[in-house]
Image (tube, helix red, strand yellow):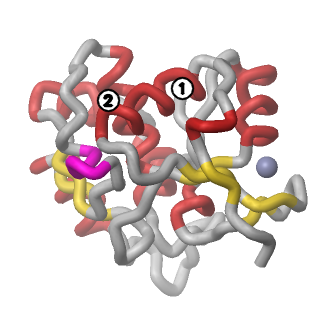
Amino acid sequence: MIFQDESFFSFLFRTQLIYGYLDFSNIFRMNGMVRTTIIAKEQLLPIYGRINKKALYLMINRTQREKISLEQPYSHLEEFNRFLQQGVAVLTGSDFFFVRFCKECLDESYKLYGISYFKKEWEINLYCKRHKRTLSEMTGRGAKHSVEIMTRLISGGTLHDSEFIIHPPP
Ligand SMILES: [Zn+2]
């Protein structure tokens, strides 16, 4: 399943998890932060190539525009092809970041689709406009922790208070 508002690292994480590629060092740095440039698993490139091109394109599109405008129809086409051919994915934010999430958004998507995913907007925001709350963050505990928590959250699991921090209100 593909969600157009999903962060690309979340999508790559989910596909690796599903297909059993459990080494996530291409996604996380040792300290647990998300890499800003992710090299997809070579073995999965044929699978990514079979995904609906438009949906994948919209997810890769870092400008977060809902629709591809006619003035700049394929401004990210080069980036798109680079991903399909070489597996290189560049994320929206310019800095490494710890995974942030709104638990209510995750719960909503789990109820609707039986799976949760991490939204692209959380890469740059500290606040969920939909639920009017600050985002939680899994911080400072290393890559293994980030992988564990993401796996649990994607499958509708819960967290202990000690496993994340909540940002102060903006
Ligand atoms: Zn939310």
Q: Residues within 10 Å of mark 2 (few under 14, many from 20)?
A: few
Front residue of 13 and 60: 13
Estimate the x, y position of residue 12 in percent, counting from the top left.
Answer: 35, 38
Select label 2 or label 1 by which is in front. Answer: 1
Q: Distance from label 2 to label 1 (Cα)?
A: 12 Å
Q: On the image, numbered disc 1 is attached to which residue?
A: 1
Q: Any atom of ligand 1 within 8 Å of the CB at mark 2?
A: no
Estimate the x, y position of residue 166 in percent, counting from the top left.
Answer: 69, 55
Q: Secondary structure at mark 2?
A: loop
| Residue at the far front in the pictured view | 162
Q: Amino acid at mark 1?
A: Met
Q: Residues within 10 Å of mark 1 (few under 14, many from 20)?
A: few
Front residue of 155 and 31: 31
Quadrant in the picture for residue 148: top left
Q: Is residue 4 visible?
A: no
Disc ID at residue 50: 2
Residue occupying the point 24% across, 68% down: 78
Tag 2–tag 1 contact (CB < 8 Å): no
Residue occupying the point 41% across, 63% down: 97
- Residue 100 within the segment the image draws in magenta: no
Q: Secondary structure at mark 1?
A: loop
Left or right of 19 on screen, residue 137? right
Pointer 2 or 1: first along the chain: 1
Quadrant in the picture for residue 67: bottom right
The magenta stretch spans which residues?
A: 27-31
**Image height of 111 relative to 139, above or below:** above
**Image height of 59 relative to 49, above or below:** below
Residue occupying the point 52% across, 86% down: 71
Q: Main secondary structure of the magenta part?
A: loop
Front residue of 99 and 121: 99
- Residue 30 within the segment the image draws in magenta: yes
Q: Amino acid at mark 2?
A: Arg
